[in-house]
Amino acid sequence: MKKSCFLLLFIFVAAMLSAGFVSADVKLPEIFSTNMVLQQELPVPVWGTAAADEKITVSFAGQTETATAGNDGKWSLTLKPLKANAEPQTFTVKGNNEIKLENVLVGEVWLCSGQSNMEWTMTRSAEYNDELPKVENKNIRLFQVSKAWNQEPQDTLANNPTWQPCNAETIPGFSAVGYFFGKKLNAELKVPIGLINSSWGGTRIEPWTPPCGFNAVKTLSNIAEDVAARDPKTDFHKKLVTNMLGEYKNWLETAEKGLAGAKMQVPPPAYPQQLAPYANHQQPTVLYNAMVKAFVPFAMRGAIWYQGESNMSEGLLYAEKMKALILGWRDVFKNPDFGFYYVQLAPYIYGGGDPTRLAYLWEAQAKVEKELPKTGMAVINDTVSDIRDIHPPRKSPVGQRLALLALNRTYSKKNIVCASPEFDKMEVNGATAVLSFKEAKELKTRDGKAPDWFEIAGIDGVYHKATAEIAGTTIKLTSPAVQKPVAIRFAWHHEAEPNVQNEAGLQLGAFRAGEIPVRSVFDSLVPEGKNFKLLYSFDPTQPQLSDDKTQIVYKTDNTREIVGKIKKVGYFLYLKPKDGKEQFVFVTMPPLSDKLEQLGVPVKSTGARFQKQIKDVAVYSNVEGVATGKFADGFNVEFWDCNYGPLNQAQVPGASAVKWDFGDEMSGQSPGYGSMQIHNFAKKQTVFAFNNFAAGNNADVGIGNNPDANGNPDWTFSKNAQKQSGGQLMIFVEPE
């Protein structure tokens, strides 16, 4: 027995010693390997793991720095800024063991990231066969990150990637945009170039963004909160868990008492959705955690970015998300001058029925470079061979235009023209709109024809194709259909491959200017609404739905321009009866949903269905009998897309199944009759009603109670739209 115990003890001690010996080995992250490129002219962080209290020495290029591993085995130090050097050197790390990394160069390091058009490999590029014999370049090095995602930040990368020299064996699977970008930099700067490709096709922007990025952009506070909720280290997570445990404890106590008293049990509280782990690789931070965090804060000059297809419908919200990504990367890499150069998406025929959706994203992308320094956008609307292919195969001009931006704005080579023409201002001279441009010594067309894809609109808001004429750095627009221009737009269509460029051959990107006075009636009648922004507008006396009856056709849809949390929503109904004076009502209230589309007409595509009482309501109206002022409570809404019955299922005070049927029950399939009603049930009033959306001029629309004693006070079945000579239903929001 003693021998057996001694043998077990010996095996245990030997195992512990062996484990201790292994853990004593100094280790580096994968980003430090033979063939790597280190960033010139910036402090160079170096870090890794070793045994606790182990002394680490790093030697490179005549420098020697030391660090001591902490109790967790982690250590870090910083080399002083290095000078560019194309001669291979040895990078040495010593602890209880020694690591020697060979063939190390010093130059410029860039991160290449985004979705499929950045991931797009050299083998699939149009230039591959011609370029392959030229790719070998000992001064360009490649680092390929494997795809992975994780709920928590990772210190290692999947599949142990290493730096590789650029040659015919390593380049086929590397980013084509990244390669052509690096090739141009190497030719112009005459220093080694290191390219880190961390990209994944089909991914959104949110997964690439670190938590600090969302925290830096106020309009994305909802995403920042969701990320914090899932981080066990945050106070917000701890608060949610504490509250959850309290609810469970209360339920357990109640359940135990119920069991003892033989009473029916109630279900336990639901698990908070904010604490539920992310389910896939499209969720915020998860790609940063697994495909970037492990090489933070490796010294680098900046990043190139080609992404946006997966966020295509977000309009100006995408600009806010780009800011979060840029500010987040600048923070984690400890480099406020971190360059960020990105690609404006190429023309492509997207589905969804709205050919202008892509133009709003183009506008968002263009906004970023105007608001953040050391950023720039490469316009590529002339590089597409097939607008039905979301992956334009020509990647050389894309990489080269990104390089021009970096050379000019990061490396201060001001003799290099990098910017596309930029709209400056519009002046109206009679029936002519005169547009002036910056970033151009002269304007021209790449095909020698007249400028195309310009449109012009008058006060009615209808855009017409414009005749365009170039004069130096101005363009004059006219149309026989528009005698007094108020607005113009250019390339505002997903098929637009326009021909206007500057003297350097850089393309003019999509833009719009001027303003159509959509809200002039509202502003004149409701001065109290000046802080509200227009979300939707249309004529409720002639409503239009899509062919499948699931979407409303708005005249104005500004969902892509409104970002951040909403404090109030306002509904403005304006009617021009054929036999009476103009009527209006404006109702404000807390938003029914944090989804903008659910604040509009409740059609099937939005999923909006609300039968609820509301508080903090204000009413402005010129209609006799409509109670105006501010109200703490006493109101309810009935917004839905289906049919409905008279039963007071919602138990609205004062409602009945006969006349004051403000508590209607939703019933039947969608799309149905449809209801968009606001009631002051405390005073037994309909504030306004808009029903039967699909009926066109036979829709129900009215302000106040229906005066017809034989009808419904909420205008149901009144077909009252046909009694109007026109009108407007406008939905406004007041941002926080």
Image (cartoon, helix red, strand yellow):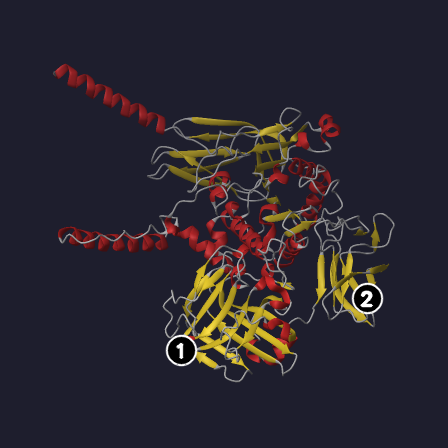
Task: Give how far across and how far down residue 360 sits, in percent.
Answer: 65, 56
Residue density around tag 1, few if under 14, some if 14–19, many if 20 or more, within 10 Å? some
Q: Amino acid at mark 2?
A: Ala
Label 2 to label 1: alpha-carbon separation: 51 Å
Residue that mark 2 sits on: 481
Residue that mark 1 sits on: 682
Residue at 58% in and 46% down: 310
Task: Give how far across and how far down residue 408 sits, in percent.
Answer: 70, 49
Task: Give how far across and how far down residue 88 sits, in percent.
Answer: 60, 28
Instruction: State left or right for residue 516 relative to residue 46.
Output: right
Residue extending farthest front: 710
Secondary structure type for disc 1: helix
Quadrant of the rendered image containing residue 725 = bottom right
Above or below, 51 relative to 695? above
Marker disc for residue 412: none
Above or below, 414 relative to 152? below
